[in-house]
Amino acid sequence: MTQTHRAPTVSFVGAGKVATTLAVLLARRGYTIASIVSRSGSSARSLARRVRCPRYSASVADLPPESQFVLVAVPDDALRAVGAAIARLPDLPFSRLTIAHTSGVATSDVFRPLKDKGSAVFSLHPIQLFSPAVSLDRQMRIMDGITYGYEGPARTRRFARRIVRDLHGRFLEIPKQEKILYHVACVLASNYVVGLLGASEQLMRSVNAEGMRALKPLVEASVQNAFDGGAARALTGPIARGDVRTIDLHLGELKRRKKDVAALYRSVGQYALLMLRRHGRASGMRFDRLRRKLK
Ligand SMILES: NC(=O)c1ccc[n+]([C@@H]2O[C@H](COP(=O)([O-])OP(=O)(O)OC[C@H]3O[C@@H](n4cnc5c(N)ncnc54)[C@H](OP(=O)(O)O)[C@@H]3O)[C@@H](O)[C@H]2O)c1
């Protein structure tokens, strides 16, 4: 691990959405990208060109021995094998090597063979979505000020903080034993919100093809209120008001016309109700009545 003020030289394993974004950002912030490795090599070549990196390859055996920091951004299922393959390389100075991955769910333990060889290992997860549907320009804009979830030992904290600062991000330490729940939180906040919007979109399509746009201010205000005062305080609507008749009408129509959405309505509604009760907003009889309806 480098302790100097000069930016460390970085090699990437993976040249997909996350690696491309981080490599471009780090290159813009003055980091030298020493090499890019990907499974096929062709994505490594195109990323290498983009960040003016002299080396690219389809094999981790080509990681240069002068590597100081290796950032691995490959699918979660490939992490263990990639770590083990790097640990088998004969010429890397393992005790001077820092290696991290970007998975939201895996911990640094996935790189145990590298740790056993004396390398410093951690995970650094950018809390943002990386979609092929988003252009690199737009991706760069949505990276500014995001949070990076760090999980790892005290010895790499300072180094990781520096990387995060240079990425113009915020640093959030995640205890190892909380990593999976942390990732569930991220997935709910992102993918599940989109899932709910998908259901809303489906219903709106039966009303008017343009209908979804009408919901944008509602979605934005709900999200803003949840961030301002917490989700339990932000909840409005029939569950918060205890409007059993409205919930009956909703469920009756959904059962008749949109069975798949009925299950979703019930299950998210049940959670919203529990949330209200925990915050003292749904007492005794009202809670029981609503719970029976949403079962
Ligand atoms: N996507 C997101 O929204 C997001 C957000 C935060 C964190 N992450 C995490 O970031 C990591 C990378 O995700 P991503 O979305 O960037 O994935 P991706 O776009 O699918 O890219 C994966 C890259 O890994 C390479 N690769 C696959 N197996 C490999 C192997 N055995 N050896 C070397 N390279 C290999 C692929 O090579 P080829 O190009 O040759 O196929 C590709 O370049 C994952 O751990 C993911 O959980 C993702």
Image (tube, helix red, strand yellow):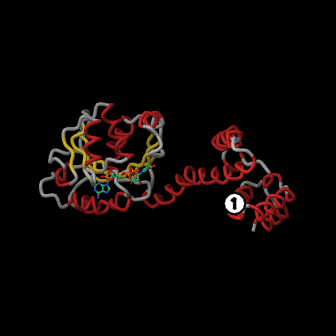
Residue 91 sits in quarter: bottom left
Q: Nearer the viewer, residue 50 or 236?
A: 50
Residue 231 as seen in the image, left or right of residue 189: right
* Residue sitting at x 25%, y 43%: 45
Residue 255 position, x and y percent, is: 76, 65
Give, as a three-letter code, the residue at label 1.
Val
**Towards the viewer: 96 or 253:** 253
Relative placement, left or right, of 61 versus 208 is left
Asked if 10 appears above or below 83 in the picture, the reply is above
Q: Residue at x 48, y 36 (%)?
A: 142
Spot occupied by residue 113 in the image (x, y as percentages of width and height): 25, 63
Element marked by disc 1: helix
Task: Look at mark 1 in the image and give the residue it sits on.
Answer: 261
* Residue at the image position 32 percent from the left and 42 percent from the top: 159
Quarter that holds the C terminus: bottom right
Q: Count every numbered label the image shows and give the total.
A: 1
Mark 1 C-beta to ligand 1 under 8 Å: no
Relative to 169, say whether 249 is above or below. below
Spot occupied by residue 144 in the image (x, y as percentages of width and height):
46, 34
Residue ID at (19%, 38%): 54
Along the line of sight, the residue nearer the viewer: 40 or 96: 40
Asked if residue 170 is positioned above or below residue 260 in the image, the reply reads: above
Q: Residues within 10 Å of mark 1 (few under 14, many from 20)?
A: some
Q: Quarter holding the N terminus?
A: top left
Is 128 left or right of 2, judged from the image as shown? right
Name of the residue lying farthest toward the left: 91
In the picture, measured across the screen, residue 142 lies left or right of residue 295, that is left
Place of residue 285 in the rendered image (x, y in percent of width and height, measured from the top left): 85, 64
